[in-house]
Structures are given as structure tokens and as C-alpha cells.
Image (tube, rainbow, N blue to C red):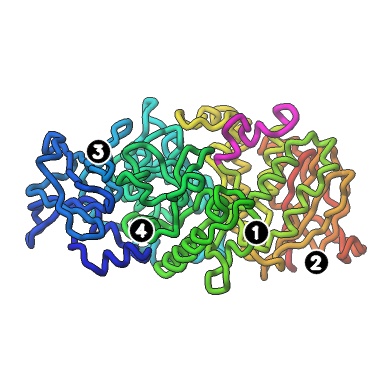
Amino acid sequence: MRLLSDHDVNEFLLGRASNLHEFMGSHLLKDENGDIYATEFTVYAPNAVEVRLISSFNNYEGWKHVLTKIHHMGFFRIEVLGNHEWATYKYEIHTTKGRTIFKADPFAHFAEVRPQTASKVTDIDGYIWNDSNWLYTKKKSYEQPLLIYEVHLGSWRRKFGAFKPYNEVVDELITYVLDQGFTHIEFLPIYEYPLDDSWGYQGTGYFASTSRFGVPKDLMYMIDRLHQAGIGVIFDWVLGHICKDAHGLSFFDGTPLYEFNDKERRENITWGTDNLDFSKGITRSFMLSALTYWMDYFHADGYRIDAVSNLIYYLGNKQKGVNQDAINFIRQASFHLFGKDDRILFMAEDSTDYPYVTHPVSTGGMGFNYKWNMGFMNDVLRYFKEDPIHRKFHHDKITFGLVYAFNEQFVLPFSHDEVVHMKGSLVNKMPGDYFQKMANWRLLLTLWMTHPGKKLLFMGQEFASFSEWAFNKELDWNLFTFPAHQKANRFFKDLAQIYRHHDALYLYDHHPKGFEWSVVDDYDQSVFAFIRRSDTETLIIILNMTPNVHEFYEVGVPLHGTYEEILNSDKEIYFGSDLYNGVPLKTTKQDKNQFHYIIKPTLGPLSGIILRHIKK
């Protein structure tokens, strides 16, 4: 802990501070021998008449510990003798309007387990990390496979119906994620939040790991172990709005301190939250410091920023105009975060057509390096919901995405948002009987895994869970006792390994040289074929979107020679009808579309095929 300086104050107020956690909040003070002799509390409340500390060590009687105003701009501080680690506390703030409000510490590193709302003193320093190999050897992701497993930690696994702690779930998580073939985990928000039903998207403690699963160093241990196993960790992050609960950041000193002053822009009625005002320097410094804190203390590999459309436009409404202050802050954050680690993943969950979202700040972009491709997700799921007999009328839902696929650097998401609120799980969106639903699910995942763009899949969808996701119970792991779901998961794992071990499927994800259509206009039969290529290999992907079987279906290919089938979703081992191409396919010289050679594979019902060109 270091004392607040005038420079710190100026940087905070001007929106340039990225280290507020070093001098704000509660800290344990140590002597030269490392022994704790006092506990210090610092808070910013410029519109407070007086600030008192209520705590478990003073029987929650604020008159016993009145903070001293140490700076005229509104900083208050108190030093209490003794080691008060794990003590609960809040600030008793007396406002200029004669009200007394009780607030949790915005910079606390820990909090009580909900429904209790007090902050807790904890020593955030001293964890010994063992992930140096990961930190020094991980690569930039642009030309690497990126297969993200989106996880809600509270419902992935449970222990007797309750939450499973960080240090207990980590072994299972590592084993499972490695077995499935994912490269990264993206955790739904695990900073502190009061209501389980919000899934973490209405936060109150942006510097505190949630106490639901253990203390902060337990989370550090889990991330450390994940890194040692070669698994990256991404945090889902709400940047634009805050929870309105009385103990939170909203109206912290009785005034809209960090949020918009005017009610129209502040009130986010849809989510019941307050929108942050990034024209205020203190708001920029707060969020910049929070993002920095999780990189420094928890070794975050990246962030997925939620609801970017609500940052680009006021209230997410294009008609209300561009929120230039928020965009400027994103650029500032990008410049800062990439300056700390140019391999970081900085992802936008953005449904707008605002340009240059994933372009660098230096070239006029917003500064994200990835954007969720919401258009792909919406179009593809709408297509697959159609009865196959009607799919010919929706052909463009598959082809249109390639018109803009390389305008930004995209992640293709099948996220939690698509499997809740009566939308059904991925497999349950599919038409047909049980067998056809599973076939359509395999076909959907084949398209997703072979389409240009990085990948994200929400937990449970990798074994074709039929139930909608429910935040208050664990996944339906019992499905692994059924052969159909065992085979479904085998398909996913094989598909993931093909993705990770064939650079044609990821090397040019963001460049058109890695993709080319072969069959794009067979509306009547709803068949698609395209080419994915790298500098060393060529793959042909063929998708038969109907239950009709096609023997000797002609597909134009760019290279003479032989093509071997490396995956067929219709194989019996995947719960298919077992129509596949068991011998390599030799080319015939014949013009087809823009190519001079053809192959004639058999296309099973509702099947996805991946063929690899064999070099002589």
C-alpha cells in the first residue's frame, strides 16, 4: 500500500489511472519484517459530508472510526491498528442532502457470500504463480486454432446441489477441457455480483472475485493450474452498465458519481441497470484499473466485453446517436491492454454494423481484436430450424455471411444466450425426429467448425444436451450414459481435433485467400461445398442439408489427384446411417464451376464431409 499523491489524484480525475487498486480500498499494512500492524481504508466520495467505517471489529458502529478527508477533491482515509484480515466492512456515507447510505467498497478484493453484501478485508498479495511457461510461450491467436469453451462455473458441476469451489472443480475442468479439445475457457462473469439469476452480468465488485466459489487466491490457483495445462482463460466483462443494488457503485455518494447524470441516458430499463458515463475521468480510470487488476493479479488472457452495442450507441439505439466517449474509452483501454500484452484477446459482443470494430486504434479502429459474429449465429440457426424441405428457400442464410466474413476478425459464437429463455438447446432447435435432430446437430457443428472465424461454444452443447441451460443446476452429465450422446460427443471431439490439427481451418480465418466456394448455388438440393486452404494443404467441405442421399454428386475441385475423407458426420460411430466414402476419391478432368477437375462423393443424409487433398 502506498500513500495517495497529487499525481495519483490528477490521473484518477483525468481518466488516465490504471492502478487505483494500489491505493484505494482496504489494504493490510506490514512492517519491515512483513508483519501486519494495521489495516488501511481509502475511499473516494466527493459529495459526502462525512464518511465512517462500519465493521465487524467495531460492532458496526461508525462513530468509532470516522475517516479523515485527506484531499479536497473527495478522498477519505483511515488507518486502524491491528490485523483485520477477513473482517467485514462497509462505508457509512453522510450525503450533502442529509441522507445516510451504506456502501460496499468499490475497490474491495473480496466480499461476503450473497445474500450478505459487505466487503471483506483480504491480502491479495503473495500468491506464488507457476505458469511462467504459459505466459512466456503463448502465441498470438490470429493464425492459431482458437476453440473457446464458454463456462458458467456455478452450473458446470455442482457438489450436493451447491456450488463447487474453485480448488475442487479445477482437476475435473482441466481433464475435461483437454479431452474435448478446447484451447481456452471463457468464464461468465466471476467478479462479485449479488443475484445468481443475473449470471454475473449485474456486478457490484469489479475488483473482487466472487465469494461463491472461494477466496481470491483459490481462483488464482485454478487459473494457475489451467495455464500449466495449456488452457487460456478469458473473462466475460460488463463494461457499460452497473447493478443498481443499494450497496453497489450506483449513486455511490448519493449522486450519480460514475454513471450518467441525466436519467434518460442513465436508466437501462431493459436490464434494470445504470449506464456508466465515460465522459467522466473517474469512470474511465475505474474500469481501466479493474481490467488491469485482473491481468496483473489473475493473469487474465483476455476479455469478452458484453453488450458493445450499448457502448457504441446510447442505450443501444442507433437513433439516439453514437456514444463517442465510450468508443474513445474502448480505444484507450485497447491501447493500454495491448501495451501490457500484445497477445491479449479483447473481444466485442457486438450486434451492430459499426465499422472497424476489430481494427487497431492506430488505423482508426475501435481496438478490439475480435468481434462475435452475431449475423452468422442468427442466420445459421434460423436456417437449421427450417424443415429441410424448405431450406432451399433460405439458401442465402448460409451464403450471405461470406459477403462480410473478412471485414472484421470474427469469432463464431454459439453462446449461452442461444440456449436459454425458451430458445431450446442447439440440438433441440433442430427439426425432425430424434435421429434427424442429432444428424442436424452434427451438420451444424461441421459448418461452424469449418467456416472462417474462431470458435466459441457454450458448455453442454458439446454432448448435444437436450435441456435448456439452467443456471441453478449442473449440466445433464447423465446423458453420457446414453450411447447416442456418447457418439455425439465423440463426433465433437474428432471434429475439434481435425480443426486443431489442420491449419487450413484456421491459418487464414481473417483473409479471403483461405476460403473459396465450390458449390454455392444448388438451391434445389440444398448442398454446399467450399474449400479451406493454407500454404500446405487443401480441404474440401461438403454439406448436404437434406435427408436425401446423393450418389456420385459432382463437386468441382482445384487440384488434380486424390481426396481422402477425414471426417463424415454420417458414420455409425457418430450415431449416423453409415453412408460414407471409404476409399479415396480420384479426380476426373472436367470443368465444374470455375475448376477443371471434379470428384464424385456419396453424400449421406444430413451429412457433413471433410476431404483432404493428398499430395503425391
Count of marks, rendered view? 4
> Which numbered disc covers residue 201?
none
Distance from disc 4 to disc 1, alpha carbons, whole Å, reads 44 Å
* Residue type at the position of mark 3: Thr
Instruction: State left or right for residue 142 relative to residue 342.
Output: right
- Pick whichever of labels 1 and 2 is earlier in the sequence: 1
Label 1 vs label 2: CA separation? 18 Å
Q: Which residue is mark 1?
A: 505
Q: Nearer the viewer, residue 3 or 488?
A: 3
Residue highlighted by disc 2 = 559
**Is 525 located above or below residue 323 in the figure?**
above
In the picture, measured across the screen, residue 47 lies left or right of residue 187, that is left
Label located before the other in sequence (2 or 3): 3
Residue in the image at 34% along x and 37% along y = 246
Look at the image and give the residue range highlighted in magenta: 416-436
Per the image, is 400 magenta?
no
Q: Which percent across, then down, holds residue 103?
A: 28, 41
Q: Is residue 400 visible?
A: yes
Q: Which residue is mark 4?
A: 282
Structural distance between the alpha carbons of marks 3 and 1: 59 Å
Answer with mark 4 or mark 1, whichever residue precedes in sequence: 4
The tag earlier along the polypeptide, 3 or 4, is: 3
Front label number (2 vs 4): 4
* Quadrant position of residue 24: bottom left
Residue 523 versus residue 485: which sits nearer the camera? Answer: 523
Disc 1 marks a residue whose amino acid type is: Leu
Residue type marked 4: Ile
What residue is at 25 percent from the left and 48 percent from the top?
A: 48
List the residue tagged with mark 3: 100
Q: Amino acid at mark 2?
A: Leu
- Disc 4 is placed on an element classified as helix
